[in-house]
Image: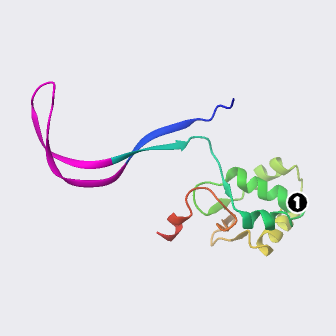
Amino acid sequence: RTNIKIKNSLKLISRGDLIETVNVATGEVNSGVYSAIVKENKTEQDKFVKIYPEGCKVFNTLSKNATYVLWYFISVIGYGDTVALNMKKVKEFTGYNTDKSIYTAISELKDKNIIANHYRNGIYYINPLYLYKGQRYKLLE
């Protein structure tokens, strides 16, 4: 049996009109309360990244170096569509000793449209068609 951590919360689906409620224990009338439809929302607390079928197809074509660097990016990705390159940490993660191996892998990831240059050095956009952490529809909002 696995220990999946679930977080329960309440989500307001819709808010209706102002109504009056009565506290059964005290008989006190409360006004200015909204009627509402509320849904219990369960979410997994453990961190995860979504990998989409199109990403699987492309990832299978990567070299060993590019795959290791991609796994590093997946391990450090935050919510949103960017990831930062920390050369010291990527070297520790991949076991590579030279910057050249990492930059060659990054070039391959860019050629396959998995990542793209950000306007800031050391930051890369992740292609949300392949992988994403969070809700992709929020990119459109």
Q: Residue at x 57, y 40 (%)?
A: 45
Looking at the image, residue 36 lies above or below residue 102? above
Looking at the image, residue 2 lies above or below residue 40? above
Location of residue 63 in the rendering, given as x and y in whole percent from the top left corner: 89, 64
Pick whichever, 20 or 89, lies toward us.
Answer: 20
Q: Residue at x 68, y 32 (%)?
A: 2
Pick whichever, 72 or 20, lies toward us.
Answer: 20
Q: Residue at x 84, y 51 (%)?
A: 94
Task: Quadrant for residue 54, please give it.
Answer: bottom right
Task: Quadrant for residue 130, please give it.
Answer: bottom right
Queried whether the magenta region covers residue 61, the answer comes back as no
Amino acid type of the residue that numbered disc 1 sits on in the rendered structure: Asn
SS assignment for the magenta stretch, majority: strand
Task: Quadrant for residue 66, please give it.
Answer: bottom right
Q: Is residue 104 left or right of residue 15?
A: right
Q: Can you say which quadrant of the picture contains the N terminus?
A: top right
Location of residue 135 in the rendering, given as x and y in whole percent from the top left corner: 55, 59
Residue corresponding to mark 1: 65
**SS label for mark 1:** helix
Location of residue 136 in the rendering, given as x and y in whole percent from the top left corner: 56, 63
Q: Residue at x 80, y 58 (%)?
A: 69
Looking at the image, residue 73 lies above or below residue 47? below
Task: Tell me which segment is drawn in magenta.
Answer: 12-37
Q: Is residue 125 left or right of residue 92?
A: left
Location of residue 139 in the rendering, given as x and y in whole percent from the top left corner: 53, 67
Q: How many marks?
A: 1
Looking at the image, residue 44 lies above or below residue 55? above
